[in-house]
Amino acid sequence: MKTPKDYDCVKMMRDIRDKVNAEIVQLDSAQIVEYFRKKSEEFERKYGQVTKTHLP
């Protein structure tokens, strides 16, 4: 017997992936790298968790 879910992880993952793809579809490779660098820094500021190794 299945219990009702409050959320669907797979649907959430697909929604997030589709949102990011829509935001970067028109960007070139350098702009995509900058996009993810900026989003990573925003995440670190918001949640205080390091998401990458800091390379020079």
Image (cartoon, rainbow, N blue to C red):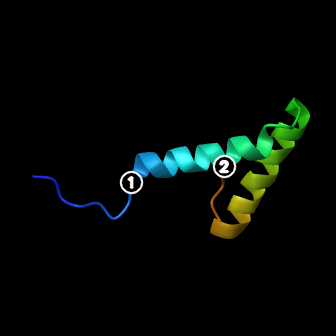
| Number of dots carrying numbers | 2
Q: Amino acid at mark 2?
A: Lys
Query: Can residue 46 be seen in the rendering of this structure?
Result: yes
Whether 46 is drawn above or below 21: the answer is below
Q: Secondary structure at mark 2?
A: helix
**Residue assigned mark 2:** 19
> Within 10 Å of the Cα at label 1, are there few (<14), some (14-19), or many (20+) other Cα atoms?
few
Q: Name the residue nearer the viewer: 29 or 46.
A: 29
- The extreme top residue here reads 29
Tell me which residue sits at (63%, 60%) in the image.
Answer: 49
Whether 43 is drawn above or below 24: the answer is below
Tell me which residue sits at (29%, 60%) in the image.
Answer: 5
Q: Secondary structure at mark 1?
A: loop
- The quarter of the picture where the C terminus appears is top right
Q: Amino acid at mark 1?
A: Asp
**Residue assigned mark 1:** 8
Residue 1 shown left or right of residue 30 in the figure: left
Residue 2 shown left or right of residue 46 in the figure: left
Whether 2 is drawn above or below 25: the answer is below
State how far apart marks 1 and 2 are (Cα).
17 Å
The picture places residue 53, in percent across and down from the top left corner, at: 71, 43
Tell me which residue sits at (77%, 47%) in the image.
Answer: 23
Pointer 1 or 2: first along the chain: 1
